[in-house]
Image: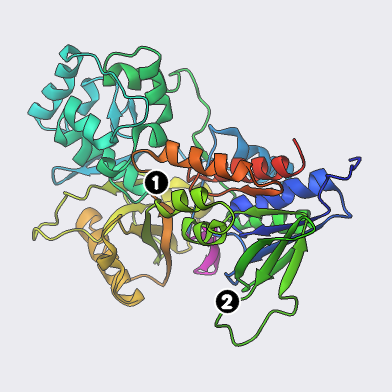
């Protein structure tokens, strides 16, 4: 591209997660080979919550395991980096739900557990619960405020508690590790909010308007057979960025003569980085809310305060490789509501299981270990994670046996913990993000990206990274 005096030639990206790497990739495409792009991260590896580990000698995703295919940014990036011919989609196996002590099929015509009609709810809800969904059409029309409402509060008011506890919370738990009561409708389900704004009178009507067309045969999810770490590797190589891993960014300061100074190294570190300060024409902050708040405090106090309001949830993924021939249920997995109990009335440790050997054809290999994973951790319930990896594996195995009857001892297991890894999109989150964006827009040469802004999935994070890069080059 042709360059003018305002085009940055030195850019520092703080954060090597998917948002930061997408920003680095787009910056290279825009700035050309001569630009210096440095990506810094306190972690020892790039990728953030995309992490492909080895389980029983095979690549296995321990963080994000799929890309939402109905949103374009993730699939577009996979194709752009040369992985289009590697994209695969799930099998026809369907998800199940633990409801009222039974494992049942996930109802059709629902959006994140919200029903578009009462008909599919039998078997999941009690007779009273089904009647409550049917009666919603007779209630006064919904009028949303301009700001936001609690998703759980609205659903409880319109449908009753069962829909939240048995349907919505289990589904949201897999995405946000948080329950519906603490999440905002406009941030979590913008299509439903938009349907209300466009005149939908009831929640069932708003959900029906938001569902994909029945005729659409497009797959919902996609992944890579070698793990999504392949995308990370391509972004690192293709961006040509200098990776400064294991080097936290301590400060981002304006340079008196213009541009920025990025200071590396923890304050108490024993060894200073070889290059403790980087000069930059532009900076992308693609870090979790606590780090973003700290770095922005002297530069944009309003943005820093808004980031500080974002609460976080921790979780863990427990991957199991079961002996060859182990029979898993025919479903792609099972979601478990917080209110569900084991036979002895104790809580389940796991909130969900993914039967990877059923969900993905590349994990279904005859004569080889049977791969699957369990997810643990809900917002505000960190105690369940305060056990050793071995204890976590045993608790997850016990839940698996209770739910499926599978008791086989694993031939391999891997535990990956994501401390504070999932931002909570609470009531007012969209307004909070708007405050961040307004404040950052006043800082010439600085942009923000990441999972705390416009969505926690890979496509949403990619979108923020690319938008940050294009803002810095004046597009």
Quadrant for residue 270, please give it.
bottom right
Residue at image position (87%, 53%) is 33
Residue 86 included in the magenta stretch of the image: no
Q: Nearer the viewer, residue 368 or 254?
A: 254
- Label 2 or label 1, whichever lies nearer to me, is 2
Residue at image position (52%, 60%) is 60
Tell me the residue that label 1 is attached to.
175
Is 340 placed above or below 322 here?
above
Tell me the residue that label 2 is attached to.
266
- Name the quadrant of the N terminus: top right
The percent coordinates of residue 197 (x first, y second) are: 39, 17
Quadrant for residue 149, please give it.
top left
Quadrant for residue 286, please give it.
bottom right
Q: Nearer the viewer, residue 345 or 361?
A: 345
Q: Is residue 287 left or right of residue 201?
A: right
Residue density around tag 1, few if under 14, some if 14–19, many if 20 or more, within 10 Å: some
- Name the quadrant of the C terminus: top right
Residue density around tag 2, few if under 14, some if 14–19, many if 20 or more, within 10 Å: some
The region drawn magenta spans 49-62
Is 115 placed above or below 197 here?
below
The percent coordinates of residue 262 (x first, y second) are: 69, 65
The percent coordinates of residue 446 (x first, y second) are: 67, 50
Is 12 placed above or below 118 here?
below
């Amino acid at each position: 591209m042709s360059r003018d005096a305002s085009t940055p030639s030195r850019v520092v990206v703080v954060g090597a997660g998917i948002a930061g790497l997408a920003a680095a990739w787009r910056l290279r495409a825009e700035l050309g080979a001569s630009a210096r792009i440095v990506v810094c991260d306190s972690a020892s590896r790039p990728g953030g919550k995309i992490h492909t580990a080895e389980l029983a000698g095979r690549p296995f995703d321990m963080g994000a395991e799929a890309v939402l295919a109905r949103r374009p940014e993730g699939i577009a990036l996979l194709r752009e980096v040369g992985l289009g011919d590697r994209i695969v989609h799930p099998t026809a196996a369907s998800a199940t739900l633990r409801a009222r002590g039974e494992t049942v099929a996930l109802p059709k015509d629902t959006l994140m557990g919200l029903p578009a009609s009462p008909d599919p709810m039998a078997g999941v809800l009690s007779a009273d619960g089904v009647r409550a969904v049917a009666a919603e059409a007779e209630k006064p029309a919904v009028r949303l405020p301009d700001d936001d409402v609690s998703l759980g509060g609205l659903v409880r008011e319109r449908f009753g508690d069962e829909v939240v506890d048995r349907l919505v919370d289990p589904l949201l738990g897999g995405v946000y590790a948080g329950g519906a009561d603490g999440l905002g409708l406009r941030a979590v389900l913008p299509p439903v909010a938009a349907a209300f704004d466009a005149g939908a009178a009831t929640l069932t009507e708003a959900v029906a308007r938001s569902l994909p067309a029945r005729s659409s045969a497009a797959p919902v999810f996609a992944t890579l057979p070698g793990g999504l770490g392949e995308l990370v590797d391509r972004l690192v190589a293709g961006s040509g960025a200098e990776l400064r891993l294991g080097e936290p960014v301590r400060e981002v300061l304006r340079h008196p003569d213009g541009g920025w100074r990025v200071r590396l190294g923890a304050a108490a570190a024993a060894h200073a980085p070889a290059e403790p300060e980087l000069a930059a024409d532009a900076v992308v902050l693609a870090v979790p809310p606590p780090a973003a708040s700290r770095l922005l405090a002297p530069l944009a106090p309003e943005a820093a305060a808004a980031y500080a309001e974002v609460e976080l949830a921790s979780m863990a993924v427990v991957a199991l490789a079961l002996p060859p021939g182990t029979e898993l249920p025919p479903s792609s997995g099972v979601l478990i509501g917080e209110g569900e109990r084991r036979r002895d009335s104790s809580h389940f440790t796991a909130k969900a299981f993914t039967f990877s050997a059923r969900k993905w054809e590349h994990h279904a290999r005859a004569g080889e270990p049977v791969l699957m994973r369990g997810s643990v951790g809900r917002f505000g319930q960190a105690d369940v994670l305060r056990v050793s990896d071995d204890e976590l594996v045993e608790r997850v195995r016990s839940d698996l046996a209770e739910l499926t009857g599978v008791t086989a001892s694993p031939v391999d297991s891997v535990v990956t913990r994501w401390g504070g890894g999932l931002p909570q999109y609470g009531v007012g989150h969209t307004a909070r993000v708007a405050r961040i964006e307004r404040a950052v827009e006043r800082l010439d040469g600085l942009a923000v990206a990441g999972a705390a802004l416009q969505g926690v999935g890979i496509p949403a994070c990619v979108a923020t990274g690319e938008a940050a890069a294009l803002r810095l080059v004046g597009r």
